[in-house]
Amino acid sequence: MTTALDTAARLFHENDGLDPHAARAHIEAALAGTDDGELFLEYRESESISLDDGRIRAANFDTRRGFGLRAVLGEAAYFAHAGEISEPALARAAETIRAAKTMEHAMVAAGPAAAPAPLYAGLNPLGEAPFASRADLLQEIDAFARAADPRVVQVMASLAGEWQVVEIMRADGSRVADLRPLVRLNVAVVMEQNGRRESGSHGAGGRSGYGPFIAPEFWQAAVREAIRQADVNLQSVPAPAGEMEVVLGAGWPGILLHEAIGHGLEGDFNRKRTSAFAGLMGSRVAAKGVTVIDDGTLPNRRGSLTIDDEGTPTSRTVLIEDGILTGYLQDRQNARLMNMRATGNGRRQSYAHAPMPRMTNTLMLGGEATPEDMIKSVKRGLYAVNFGGGQVDITSGKFVFSAAEAYLIEDGKVTAPVKGATLIGNGPDALTRVEMIGNDMALDPGIGTCGKNGQGVPVGVGQPTLKLSGLTIGGTAAG
């Protein structure tokens, strides 16, 4: 059986000719007297194909390879990278780092524990079938959507896949590797009724081959879901404004948890005391019953990793337990400076980027309430089933999110769908407003990408249905 290290050795050391012993010597020279550091080698193949209005509008294929060499000294990090994997390029990078260091410590920290069993198959999804077959599938999606509902006037669909091979080498000679597939399917439709046009969309993906997502029963369900959302929007009325009770749906609405709370629990923000959660370890930060975790070990999930981009195995990290702050997300540097353990959350966009603490799959665990009981308990409020974009200020915790699918709740019943609703609040405050926690915890379908400091990485979110005692709703109708 071919292992990840076998594949990495073939790509980086046989094909590219980077001798492992020579590489170790350059790593040792660059890291001498530092606290930590690593050589990160990467090979990535990626493709995407998109259809719009019955025609293939774009088709792309890209291959990239390169390395990033990093030395960490106290709070400083020295980083050099190149889009060429060779001993001369590595030697230049090592010399650059040696020249930049201004002080030295005594010893480089030991590397992480050995990598666990892979969480996903390492096969390259791009080699599963001819590229043309994916173009044919998008045409099928277009035809199916138009036949499913005569109101469909535009169909947009896309498939994207990548295969990433990484190897992390350290000064002590240790080497770990990972083979990371990632695929995604997206479908969107525009429907017209009585002169009004509205859209709906659905996407899904994960760390696997294309197979599960291009099966007819799967993509047809995705099309029907996009049509359902567009139909709901066609019936929608302007959203009211004002403070009201809110019920958040299960699954993808966990993106609010990710943005408004998850970023504030990353180690670097807390070490620098720029997070709203800084200095609150052991304190109550949420209502009783609220337990939030980050779990990078879920098989085949978009945000999962067998090892992070520093070589540390990912883990299930409890961040908030029954309302009490119990943990932060840590890479190796911030963990050392905060005297905490690395949690396997050191992530980078590519070889050209240095790692930092990032989320993987961030979830709120389920409770005992039923969604029906939550709805019945609301006199007048908003039921937010699906979210679009949003933004958060890490220091204050303030957030603004747009609801892509939402409904009024009146006298304990879901009534009219609304359009243009935005949820406005403060992450730490919102956690204290959780009144009921559903028994229906669900993960998102596999579509999340998180941005931080200019770097984007795939992530997952999840939560049960939640009832919050009150949030400010921005809308266009009178409250």
Image: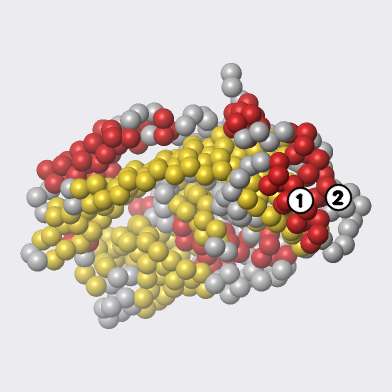
Decide which of 340, 286 is in the foreground and name it. 340
Q: Does residue 228 appear in the picture of this structure? A: no
* Kind of residue at disc 1: Ala
Residue 68: percent from left, percent from top: 66, 49
Tell me the residue that label 2 is attached to.
32
Q: Residue furthest front?
A: 88
Residue drawn at the location 47% of the way across and 32% of the way down? 124
SS at mark 1? helix
Locate residue 403: give its quadrant: bottom left
Q: Does residue 300 appear left or right of residue 286 in this picture?
A: left
Q: Position of residue 389 (x, y in %)?
A: 40, 64
377 left or right of 157 in image? right
Above or below — where is 364 with respect to 1?
A: below
Crowd around label 1: few <14 · some 14–19 · many ≥20 (10 Å): many
Comparing labels 2 and 1, the label whose residue is closer to the camera: 1
Q: Which mark is residue 94?
A: 1
**Residue 138, numbered label:** none
Percent position of residue 258, x then y: 52, 58
Quarter of the rendering occupied by the N terminus: top right
Q: 88 and 181: which one is in front? A: 88
Residue plotted at (30% across, 60% down): 405
Residue furthest to the bottom in view is: 478
Q: Is residue 271 visible?
A: yes
Q: Which amino acid, mark 2?
A: Ala
Residue that extends furthest to the right in the rendered view of this protein: 106
C-alpha distance separating marks 2 and 1: 11 Å
Task: Name the outermost residue toward the top.
Answer: 1
Q: Left or right of 427: which side holds 21?
A: right
Residue ID at (52%, 60%): 451
